[in-house]
């Protein structure tokens, strides 16, 4: 039985901890804040409740697997999982609207043909077929296996297929997501639909490899789900599973150093003398045989310089300039109208302007942003049926300072989806990148994207193993990257590497 210290109580860290505890290890999680869940937080006031992190769950099979492998109670007995239908509603710049059904290619094709015409549905359906091919090629090395030592193969190999041209005796391979939209979808509204999936993760479609086609495919193939009572309930369920497996939590415990002895990790050092830290005394040094870090690379580098990369001379490093999110929580008078979509995406009328503000210099909130509106049908989130809890989310640069004018522009855009919005507002709460930084510890409130193939490896993440024997990394900042499913997968990979050793080749 090994003594394992886990830094941070994010979703990936807790997923690893539960699996390691089941394998017989003594696991203690040290979390610098006073609660668990990382970005999965909750804001509550006057009977209203809001998720301040992700609001939907794609690929719930990842967490179903976690609960199957760590106890008798399946996930569905611990939280209420509800498939959202329609999957999303889209309001385009020209006023066109379309609602896309959940997990139905035929339904999506029909809806797009009816709303956009001109064979739009057929082109999107053909795109989904190609996206599935990219998914089949990339799924295992990117999600289910530890990062390959020869990861450069993933960086160079584009899994998205080349498209033949009827008028030309050749094929053409899109290098970026923007080229997929321009060459294959050939409708600015379909392009906006495609690019919104990348934008939600802070990815610039003009530079993001075509392999990002797997992002909309994930939603199409595996559905979009909400959790009853909000996504925070998923964090609660994982936390309680950890506790049931005898994982110990020490909150208010900031790790300030990782100790080395004889060329491998030997424990962690905590800020001050943390009450309740097992094995701690004056100096707050905790001995451990293994350490699992669930913090951002910049934080890990502070506690043990030079460790935030893959094993070996060639390192995969997270890209710089990661975006963050601006979230506006709205308490509204008046109930949620029947038939309202859970999620509406309001597309910008100034695509180039938005991209330049997000990814150019100087960077800042876009004057006409793409806004995601979440309107959950969940009585647990409102004081009564005469009120509605709405969340507005916009991608902004990490570290961005948000003005009242920026918030006003987000509200103005949201009125395209919620008529009479301003007259219904009882109060609103703004969550900025600074709030995300406070919750997660990530500098500037940066949010990692999922790992993607091709693109020179810019969207690969550091290996779960490090140059220091006995030190592992987990969560959105390491392989296989950001997003709730990916965090859960990283927990499975780290547990596999520790339990089965360096020859572990991933889930079967």
Image (cartoon, rainbow, N blue to C red):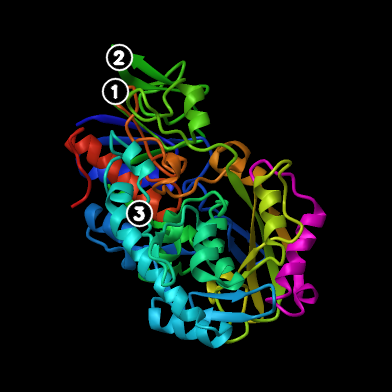
- Asked if the residue under mark 1 is in contact with the one under mark 3, i.e. CB atoms within 8 Å, the reply is no
Image position, residue 76 (x, y; %): 33, 68
Image position, residue 354 (x, y; %): 69, 56
Q: Which circle marks residue 263 in the picture?
A: 2
The residues bearing labels 1 and 2 have C-alpha atoms spaced at a distance of: 7 Å
Quarter of the rendering containing residue 425: bottom right
Precedes in sequence: disc 2 or disc 3: 3
Precedes in sequence: disc 1 or disc 2: 2
Crowding at dot 2, Cα within 10 Å, few <14 / some 14-19 / many 20+, comes out as: few
Q: Is residue 404 magenta?
A: yes
The residues bearing labels 3 and 1 have C-alpha atoms spaced at a distance of: 33 Å
Q: What element carries label 1?
A: loop
Which mark is in front, 2 or 3? 3
- Asked if the residue under mark 3 is in contact with the one under mark 2, i.e. CB atoms within 8 Å, the reply is no
Residue at 47% across / 51% down in the picture? Answer: 209
- Asked if the residue under mark 2 is in contact with the one under mark 1, i.e. CB atoms within 8 Å, the reply is yes
Which mark is in front, 3 or 1? 3
The residue segment tinted magenta is 397-426
Q: Is mark 2 on a helix, strand or loop?
A: loop
Precedes in sequence: disc 3 or disc 1: 3
Residue at 48% across / 23% down in the picture? Answer: 303
- Decide which of 236, 170 is in the foreground and name it: 170
Image position, residue 206 (x, y; %): 57, 52
Residue at 30% across / 61% down in the picture? Answer: 64
The residue indicated by pointer 1 is 469
């Amino acid at each position: 039985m090994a003594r394992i210290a886990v830094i941070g109580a994010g979703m990936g860290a807790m997923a690893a901890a539960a699996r390691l505890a089941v394998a017989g290890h003594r696991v203690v999680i040290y979390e610098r804040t006073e609660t668990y869940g990382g970005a999965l937080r909750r804001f509550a006031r006057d009977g209203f409740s809001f998720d301040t992190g992700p609001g939907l769950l794609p690929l719930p099979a990842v967490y179903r697997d976690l609960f199957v492998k760590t106890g008798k109670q399946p996930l569905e007995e611990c939280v209420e999982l509800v498939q959202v239908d329609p999957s999303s509603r889209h309001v385009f710049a020209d006023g066109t609207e379309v609602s896309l059904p959940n997990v139905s290619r035929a339904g999506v094709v029909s809806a797009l043909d009816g709303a956009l015409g001109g064979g739009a549905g057929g082109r999107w359906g053909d795109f989904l077929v190609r996206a599935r091919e990219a998914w089949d090629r990339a799924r295992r090395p990117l999600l289910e296996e530890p990062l390959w030592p020869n990861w450069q193969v993933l960086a160079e190999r584009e899994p998205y297929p080349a498209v033949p041209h009827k008028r030309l005796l050749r094929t053409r391979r899109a290098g970026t997501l923007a080229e997929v939209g321009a060459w294959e979808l050939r409708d600015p509204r379909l392009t906006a639909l495609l690019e919104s999936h990348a934008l939600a993760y802070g990815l610039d479609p003009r530079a993001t490899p075509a392999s990002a086609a797997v992002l909309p495919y994930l939603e199409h193939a595996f559905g979009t789900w909400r959790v009853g009572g909000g996504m925070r309930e998923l964090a609660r369920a994982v936390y309680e599973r950890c506790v049931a497996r005898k994982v110990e939590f020490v909150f208010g415990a900031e790790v300030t150093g990782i100790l080395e002895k004889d060329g491998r990790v030997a424990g962690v050092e905590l800020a001050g003398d943390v009450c309740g830290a097992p094995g701690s005394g004056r100096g707050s040094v905790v001995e451990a045989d293994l350490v699992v870090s669930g913090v951002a690379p910049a934080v890990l580098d502070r506690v043990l310089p030079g460790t935030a990369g893959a094993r070996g001379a060639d390192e995969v490093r997270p890209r710089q300039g990661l975006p963050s999110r601006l979230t506006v929580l709205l308490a509204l008078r008046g109930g949620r109208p029947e038939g309202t979509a859970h999620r509406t995406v309001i597309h910008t009328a100034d695509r180039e302007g938005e991209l330049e503000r997000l990814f150019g210099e100087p960077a800042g909130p876009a004057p006409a942003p793409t806004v995601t509106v979440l309107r959950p049908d969940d009585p647990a989130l409102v004081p009564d049926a005469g009120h509605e809890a709405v969340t507005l989310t916009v991608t902004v640069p990490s570290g961005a300072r948000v003005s009242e004018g920026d918030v006003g522009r987000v509200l103005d855009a949201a009125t395209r989806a919620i008529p009479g919005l301003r007259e219904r507002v009882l109060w609103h709460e703004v969550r900025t990148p600074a709030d995300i930084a406070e919750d997660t510890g990530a500098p500037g409130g940066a949010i990692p994207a999922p790992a993607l193939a091709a693109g020179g490896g810019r969207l690969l993440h550091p290996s779960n193993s490090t140059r220091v024997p006995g030190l592992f990394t987990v969560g959105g900042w390491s392989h296989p990257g950001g997003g709730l499913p990916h965090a859960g997968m990283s927990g499975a990979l780290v547990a596999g590497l520790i339990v089965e050793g360096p020859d572990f080749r991933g889930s079967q």
